[in-house]
Image (cartoon, grey):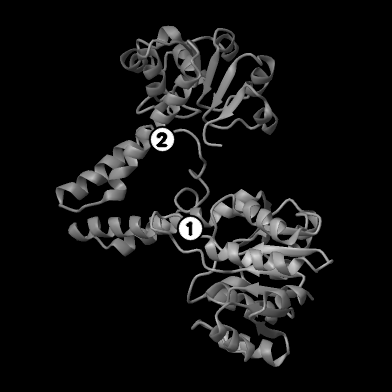
Amino acid sequence: MASISIFGLGYVGCVGIGCFAKLGHSVIGCDVDSNKVARIAKGLPTIVERDIEELMKEGYDAGLITATMSAEEAVTKSEITFLCVGTPNARDGQLDTTYLVSAARSIGVALRNKTLFHTVVIRSTVPPGTNAMIAREIEKVSGRVVNKDFAVVSNPEFLREGSAVKDFLNPPITVIGSQNEVAVKTLRALYEPFGSEIAEVPEKVAEIIKFVNNSYHALKVAFGNEVGAICKTLGIDSHMVMNLFCKDTSLNISPYYFKPGFAYGGSCLPKDLKGLNFLAHSNNVKVPILESIECSNDKHIARAIELAKSYGCKNVGVIGLTFKAGTDDLRNSASTRLAEALIGAGYNVSIFDRFLNIAREKETNLKDLNKRIPHLLPLLKVNSEEVVKNSSLVVITVRNPEIPELIRKYPNVRFIDLDRVKDPSVETLSNYEGFCW
């Protein structure tokens, strides 16, 4: 069993003490608040939360829970220190890490006289880059060397107030952000009894995931409320609508569409979004989230166009013109808008689209093609390599199996990838740039 110290005896810290003690670990709490320390020292929780009183009492009665105001004592009596101090918003919205830095410095002082390797775990929600900053602070104060004498691990918590104990003991996933093998092994041993997936990721990934999670949860609440407001004006049971919405686990509640890349298009998403916004407006319902979606999509297209222009290459190739791979449908195609913007700005554009070539060959959609893109059809090439050979910059909007080899074959041609080719090896090449990664 591990010996653990927890700095910060608020919500996250108190739940951590109770739950780690339940697993048989000895835990010492540390805080600058004497009242919190006194409560933990008596086996009493510092918060009101389901099941926490029983856990704290059990751990205290088993002799596994103690508390102190001395950082040196807490660090000396433990091999792992969890930083659970508050990181509130500053006036400008950024997270204030003042308390975290203060706690890290006190840990650094304590490590001056400690010879055993120590693992410091950041449990607080922090902005990306905090892990490295805290490591530097501890190094500076302690005189110790990071990843030799100690390591800093990013291990975000995903606890909901009201079910925090349950969430702690039954996590959907445990995230460990560290490049130190000793620290990762230590944290793995600590969390493996939970039986959930353990994801080892770079520190910055671990640091940003909590922001992403909670922002999406906030979006879900607001989205559901906007749908509810529209449904109410139309006399529709919004709960029935959203219950039906949640039954689709192939698209609606699934990983589908959650892939950073290029903008949406096609016949369905733009049309139905406009239709729902019209229902809201015609019934005097304000829906700022629904209204902002098209604007966000347009800004993403503009972002891609500006990136292409930033290279200063006059001859630009575009791989993919339809709104997505596997179809010859050009309706609301973001790729078409990109190509037209570059042509309008005076660039020499050549295009390859596998499915448009098939449509032209079989004349399955020839009338629509001549109607929609008569100005682009003369720019279509018979294969992707012809586009690459005649370009200084190539913009990839859809995945094609031959693209990775072309990126390797033509090192003097720059490639901007809007869809992420399925070949990680090309992402290390100097002539490749991912759009959202």
In this rendering, the answer to whether 28 lies above or below 357 is below
**Which of the image's four quarters has the N terminus?**
bottom right
For mark 2, give the secondary structure. loop
The residue under label 2 is which amino acid type?
Tyr
Q: Earlier in the sequence, mark 1 or mark 2?
A: 1
Q: Nearer the viewer, residue 50 or 227?
A: 50
- Give residue 330's quadrant in the image: top left
Residue at screen point 59% across, 84% down: 37
In this rendering, the answer to whether 167 lies above or below 48 is above
Q: Which of 318 and 347 is in front in this view?
A: 347
Q: Which mark is residue 264?
A: 2
Horizontal and vertical percent position of residue 292: 31, 44
Horizontal and vertical percent position of residue 179: 73, 50
Q: Which mark is residue 432?
A: none
Residue at screen point 69% across, 15% down: 409
Residue located beneath label 1 in the image: 95
